[in-house]
Amino acid sequence: MTRAAVLDRPGSPSRIEELDLGEPGPGEVRVRMLASGVCHSDLHVRDGEWERPGPLVMGHEGAGVVEALGPGVRGLHVGQPVALSWLVPCEVCRQCRSGRPWACQDSPSFRHRMPDGGTRWRRTDGQEVLTYCAIGTLAEAEIVPAAAAIAIPDGIDPAAAALIGCCVATGVGAVTKTAEVPAGSSVAVIGLGGVGLSCVMGAALADAGTVVAIDRVPSKLEAATSVGATATILAGDPADTVEQLRDLTDGGPDFVFEAIGRTETIELAFAALPIGGAAVLVGMTPIGARASFEVYPFVDGSRRILGSNYGFADPSVDFPRYAQLHLDGRLPIDRLVDRRLSLDELEDAFEGLRRGAFTRQVVVFGR
Ligand SMILES: NC(=O)c1ccc[n+]([C@@H]2O[C@H](COP(=O)([O-])OP(=O)(O)OC[C@H]3O[C@@H](n4cnc5c(N)ncnc54)[C@H](O)[C@@H]3O)[C@@H](O)[C@H]2O)c1
Ligand SMILES: [Zn+2]
Ligand SMILES: [Zn+2]
């Protein structure tokens, strides 16, 4: 039996259950989980802001070691440390064939099942349980498609390795891959959870000039400074925030990253743009949310809006690269982890996320 966090249906509390985990099928691996971050996307699902099927094993930001290989798996061995990718490419759609796995149109991750349509989880009464994004990381062990298990170098704290699988890939990639921020640019980041702080780290890595970090929780501003922000704004009245941002960036930042997913902060990002500036939308809203902007200055001022899914990650290339940058001291991922907890404390972690109380909470297994 394997302990896992199960959500019966979005909008209901998660529960820790003992489930049967089967054997890895062809092209699959079993991973002994060591750590799983708790991302705001898990909270969107937990709170019913995104419609998802259930019951499912939760979590999508995890790392562990390979424990067993299914038939035909190559390139991985038992004992290999891995970080898991929540977007398993189908490898045949137009986007995958064009080298854009982050834009895959037919990923098994969308169905929360293995590529063959099955699931390896069963309740004791035989009911099948799905696995979030085909990797459900909030479990002691998991069976995942081999394409989701990305080998990373030895010697990385599993909590930091877990974060590579979502917030780091998302935030660092939004800056360096989606926006391709040139050295010396001015950057603002609104919202300083794991995703926003990773945008800040990405801006420092890209050698941005001014990096302004914005949040409504004061402790988040200190965290941002510790990973590379050069200035901070405590968010209050949106018009005030825009004015302070303009003062700090000579009329407005070249790039604004919105890492919350709220209509009012998305519109704040648009309002802060100078001529030629770009708003990069990283935060995810509840389904159906709409934001608006005045069209004339966007066109007249050549302003841009970019959407960024998964930081345009090509996990097999980017995860080992981010891991090595961390080992080289250029991505201080460990500074994002400010609470380690056990699986039984997951609902409390969700409550912490609602309050914006932590930078990144990580469930550590075997505690
Ligand atoms: N694009 C992607 O591929 C992708 C990947 C992962 C997560 N996400 C999304 O990114 C968003 C952020 O995720 P996270 O895990 O970092 O979340 P988080 O909850 O840890 O961080 C959000 C931060 O925003 C701050 N905040 C909230 N309202 C604010 C306001 N009005 N003004 C200023 N600050 C405010 C909070 O204090 C908190 O620090 C979520 O919507 C998540 O679903 C997107
Ligand atoms: Zn996430
Ligand atoms: Zn595809």
Image (spheres, rainbow, N blue to C red):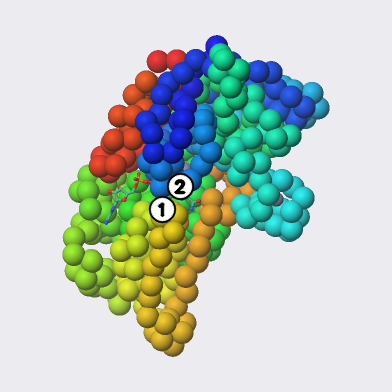
| Pick the front one: 234 or 132 | 132
Q: Residue at x 40, y 15 (%)?
A: 367
Residue 257 appears in the rendering: no
How many residues crowd around disc 1 within 10 Å: few (fewer than 14), some, or many (20 or more)?
some
Q: Residue at x 29, y 50 (%)?
A: 225
Is residue 257 shown left or right of residue 248? right
Is residue 262 shown left or right of residue 23? left
Gap between marks 1 and 2, in whole Å? Answer: 6 Å
Q: Is residue 238 above or below residue 222?
A: below
Asked where in the image residue 147 lies, by quadrant, the reply is top right
Q: Residue at x 57, y 15 (%)?
A: 125
Which residue sits furthest top?
Answer: 1
Is residue 234 shown left or right of residue 213? left
User: Residue 107 has which mark?
Assistant: none
Q: Is residue 58 above or below residue 317?
A: above
Residue 26 x %, y %: 77, 27
How many circles with numbers are drawn on the protein? 2
Residue 140 x %, y %: 51, 20
Residue 156 x %, y %: 50, 30
Residue bearing the label numbered 1: 286
